[in-house]
Amino acid sequence: MNKNELVTAVAEKSGLSKADAARAVDAVIESVTGSLKSGGDVRLVGFGTFSVVQRAATEGRNPRTGEKIKIPASKRPKFKPGKALVEAVN
C-alpha cells in the first residue's frame, strides 16, 4: 500500500473527502516525524511504538578497494509493533 492508497482507504473508512483524508494522513506523518526529531517517541497502543535509536560510529571497508572508511554515528528511526498488530497479522 502506498500513500495514495492509504489516503483512499482512510477516506472510505472515515467518510472524509480524499482531500481531507490526505491532510489527515499528512498531519499524522508530520506529527510522528516531529516527535522523533525532537527526541521523543510515539506510542500507539495496540499498533506499536516509533522511537529513535543511536547507532555508534564504526569502521567499514569500501567493497571495491578494500580501503578502511569511518562510518559516523547516526540516529535511526525504529518501529516496534504492538501485540494487537502482531496478532492481527498472524
Image (spheres, rainbow, N blue to C red):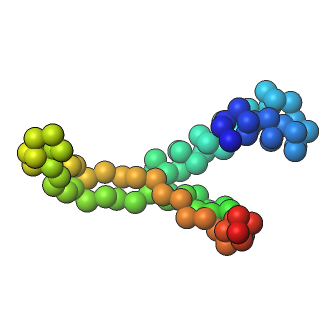
78 horizontally vs 3: left or right: left
Farthest-out residue, front: 64
Picture coordinates of residue 34, whole percent (x, y): 53, 45
Q: How many marks?
A: 0
25 horizontally vs 74: left or right: right
Q: Residue at x 8, y 45 (%)?
A: 67
Relative to 15, residue 46 above or below: below
5 horizontally vs 58: left or right: right
Q: Residue at x 48, y 57 (%)?
A: 78
Relative to 40, residue 67 above or below: above
Relative to 35, residue 25 above or below: above
Residue 70 visible in the picture = no
Farthest-out residue, right: 15
Q: Residue at x 10, y 46 (%)?
A: 66
Q: Is 34 or 44 nearer to us in this picture?
A: 44
Residue 10 visible in the picture = yes
Q: Residue at x 16, y 44 (%)?
A: 62
Picture coordinates of residue 48, whole percent (x, y): 62, 63
Q: Is 4 or 73 nearer to us in this picture?
A: 4
Quadrant location, the N terminus: top right
Residue 5: quadrant of the picture = top right
Residue 55: quadrant of the picture = bottom left
Residue 44: quadrant of the picture = bottom right
Relative to 80, residue 30 above or below: above
Picture coordinates of residue 89, whole percent (x, y): 71, 64
Picture coordinates of residue 31, whole percent (x, y): 60, 45
Quadrant location, the C terminus: bottom right
